[in-house]
Structures are given as C-alpha cells and as structure tokens.
Amino acid sequence: MSEQVRATRDVDGLRSTLNTLSEHRQTHPPVARWESRYRYAVITADVLTVVLVVIAVGAVMSMRHTAFGPLSLALLDILTVVVVVGSLAINRVWTPTVLGQGAEEFRRLGRGLFGAVVALGLGALAVDIPGARLWIFVVVPAIALVAFPMRYLLRRPLHRGRSEGRFLLSVLAAGNLDTVEDLIHRTKRVAHLGWRVDAICTIDGRGRSGTDVDGVPVVGQLRELAEHVRRGGYRIVAVTPDAYWTPRRLQQLAWALEGSGAEMVVSPGLMEVAGPRLHMSAVLGMPLLRVSEPALSGFRRLVKEVVDRVGAFVLLVLLAPLMFAVAAFVMIDSRGPVFYRQKRVGKTGVPFTIIKFRTMVTNADVLRARLASVDEGNGVLFKMKKDPRITKVGTFLRRYSIDELPQLFNVLAGSMSLVGPRPPLPEETAKYSSDVRRRLLVKPGLTGLWQVSGRSDLSWEESIRLDLRYVEDWSLALDLVIMWKTFRAVFGGQGAY
C-alpha cells in the first residue's frame, strides 16, 4: 500500500471519528462516587483546619497579648480564613488529578499557605491592625502543622483501598507494545497511585499473544482510540510513545476527547525527569517543554543544609536516651566496640567515615569471604536474610533501622544529609558507569527513595534508578514526603535485614 493511500485512510478515519464523536460531545462518564467523596473530604478537612486553628490561636494570643482586642481579633479571624482558603483555591490544591498522589499535592498545599503569608503580610502593612504581624507568623505555621498531617491521614484509607483493588481510575493505554507493557507493570507495582490499565489500543489492534498484553485486552487500533474512549468510559487516556503519534494526530485526539470526561496523559518518552524541573512554555507560537538543570546549588540547597543541621541536632537531643540504651545493649550482647565505622563515598566522590551501631560480630568482614557462595544480594552488595554474623541485638536494630541513628552525627558534621541517595561503598563506586556516577552529585542521605521503596529487597538496577530520580527531581516537598514515609517503612520493618 502506498504512503499516499495510507495517509488518505488515516485522514478519513480521523474525520469519521470526529464526526461521530461530535454528536456525543456532552456525554461524560459518571464520576465515581468515591472520587467526589474524597475531594469533598479533603476540602472540608482543609477548611475546618483553617477555621479551628485560627479560632484556637486567636483565643491563646488574646489571653497573652493585650494588643488583640475583641474587634481586631474578630477582624483578623475573618480576614485570615478568607485569605488562606482563597490562596488554597488559587493554587488549585483541590484539583482531583493531584489529590492522593505523590509530592505534588503537598507542594501545592505549601505554595498555597506561603501565598497566604505573603498576602496577609501585605495586608498588615496596608492596614494598621494591632498585633497583625505577630499573628501572621504564628497562625499560618500552626495551620501548616495540622493541614499536612491531615492530608496524609486522609491518604491512608485511600491507598489501602487501592492496594486492595478499590478506588482505581480506569486507564486506556495507547502506544507500542513495549511502552504499554512497561506502563502496565508500573501501575501494578505502584498501586497506591490509583491507575488500572483496563484496555489497550495498538497500531494494528493486536497484542503479543494476539488479543492481549500481559492479561490486558487489546480493544482496537490507535486510529480508533477516541471512539473506544467514548464507548468504554475510561477516565484516563495514557498515550505512550509510538511512531504513529505525530503532533497533528495528538492534537486531533485532544480535540476528539473534549467533553468525554477523560484526562489525556502523554508520555514524552524522552527521559525520566519530572516535578519542578519541567516547564511548559510557548515560543514562536509552538509549545516547548523546558527541562531545567537539577537544583544542585542555590537558595533551596541552602535551606536544605540548614534543615539538615538543625534537624540532626534536634533529633540527637530527643533520641539521646534511646541511643544510650542501645549502646548499653550492644555492649552486653557481644564483645566489641559500640560503634561500627566504615568508609563510604560522599558528594563528588569525597570519602568519609560512616558511623553505625555495631550489629555484627567483630570479625564480620573476615567471615564474609566464607559466605560469598550464599550471597542473596543484588549483584553488587552482599546481603543475606539470615546472616549468621548478625548478633541478637543486631537483628532487632537492623529490623527497625535503629543501627542507623548514629549517622545523625554525619549529618550534623555535613558529610551526609537527612534525605538523599544511599551512601555507597568505595568498591561500588569503582564499578560505576558515567551515568550512575550522577548519584554522587548530592550528599548521601540517612533515608531516601530507596528506604521507602523496599530497602534491601530492591534490585541493584531499581536502587540506582531511584537514586538517580532523586538527584534529577529533588525538591523540599519530596524530602518532606520521604521523611514522613520513612517512619512507616522503618516501624513496619519491611525489606530490612
């Protein structure tokens, strides 16, 4: 078949589809009841949090500061509620596509609260309300201290339900077999994000075994995609890379999906970069996806340094009784030093000495050579689920990562960060390729994506992918999410041995 005939058929097929769909432009698939309930629950929780915190802070400050009279306090209460709720709405913190997913939800919530601080600060300058400046820098942080944990608590039942196969968004994937299959595997591996691939469209309407891809049925060809979306009532259309997708065809697909209620998601298939590094802008009348450099320096990194040092100091003070108790148990359990020191490689390849509570017998390094034949690690690091070198106390310390607590001294000294890639051994870095060495562009962390994504159960490739993703997409919001998730991963003892 000639290229001209094939092109004519494609154009005719698209025209026919567009004409058919124009008759059903207003047919939206019904929004799942759980989606509406969850969104209203989040909005209600945010608004109630703002109102109750404002009232509580106002009551406390009126008792301690005479500057807050009844009239000025009532005015500040009303103004604060209106400005904070308005700022949250302007920053689209209740957009359904971000609720319950990743760090973007918390990032928007942070932007909304910061915007409220700016707006209230400017208002305090314009209107001379007694005590207004003190009020602003107390009430908004208090709202944040309640709002962020509340969002996380609302996520828990949602994610638990998704892991059980409920509260999922129906996805129609369209692309070549390899990219569609990769999407299916990712949605199954990360079920808490709420995607379930229910159908597939490919260039010829066929799968690997003829009718399906990894158990998901192939319902048609790419040129019939919009029609299948209308028929099936899918919530998400995931367009993955394929030679078929020209800019013109993607534009026509977007037009055809208008009014269908389906969200069109396009994977650029260029690189694994996301988050704050991606920016869409129009240049010379055409949309361009700008990819900025990773934030390896600057103001945000300065903030991270301050948070690391202050956070490490506070944690060391709070955890001092526990660490003294652990040190005593290590000494009682087996002979040898309390701490285990080991050379690791830090930022830009500079070596440093990591500090941990000793969890093995003193001659563990010598015994390792004898256990090489039963290595259960990821091909680079030595790991055993039932390592005979580990002491009785060491088993407990490793399960809950208590042996890692002395690394807070490394964070305080500046050789490590609270959040970052896993600190590698010198023999590991000697085997690094040029792309893997990018994980050394930032300080290693006490915790990281590897800690909350499986720990020792991860393969070497998956561990590296997570570390590189952190380097590429780092943000303060991502750090907060990782630290929050670390507590759950540690207390669950999952993947630790």
Image (cartoon, rainbow, N blue to C red):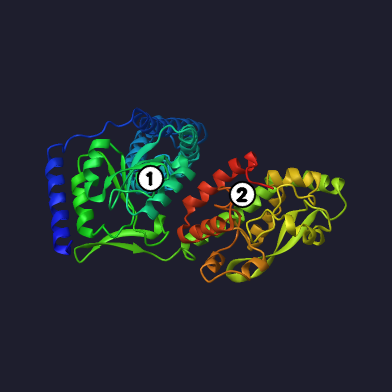
Callout in the foreground (1, 2)? 2
Image position, residue 425 (x, y; %) = 67, 64
SS of the residue under disc 1: helix
Judge by depth and name the residue closer to the eye, 156 or 376.
Answer: 376
**Could you tell whether 436 is left or right of 113 in the image?**
right
**Could you tell whether 466 is left or right of 380 in the image?**
left
**Residue found 63% across the figure and 51% down from its top:** 456
The quadrant in which the N terminus is found is: bottom left
Q: Which amino acid does label 1 sit on?
A: Gly
**Could you tell whether 223 is left or right of 154 in the image?**
left
**Residue found 88% across the figure and 52% down from its top:** 335
List the residue tagged with mark 2. Answer: 457
Query: Would residue 190 be seen by someone viewing this image from the given angle?
Result: no
List the residue tagged with mark 1. Answer: 112
Disc 1 crowd, CA 10 A, few/some/many (<14, 14-19, 20+)? many
SS of the residue under disc 2: helix
**Could you tell whether 2 is left or right of 311 in the image?**
left
Disc 2 crowd, CA 10 A, few/some/many (<14, 14-19, 20+)? some
Distance Cα–Cα, label 1 vs label 2:
37 Å
Judge by depth and name the residue closer to the eye, 453 or 282.
Answer: 453
Query: Would residue 151 be seen by someone viewing this image from the given angle?
Result: yes
Image position, residue 311 (x, y; %) = 60, 51
Q: What residue type is labelled 2?
A: Asp
Image position, residue 452 (x, y; %) = 57, 47
Image position, residue 440 (x, y; %) = 57, 66
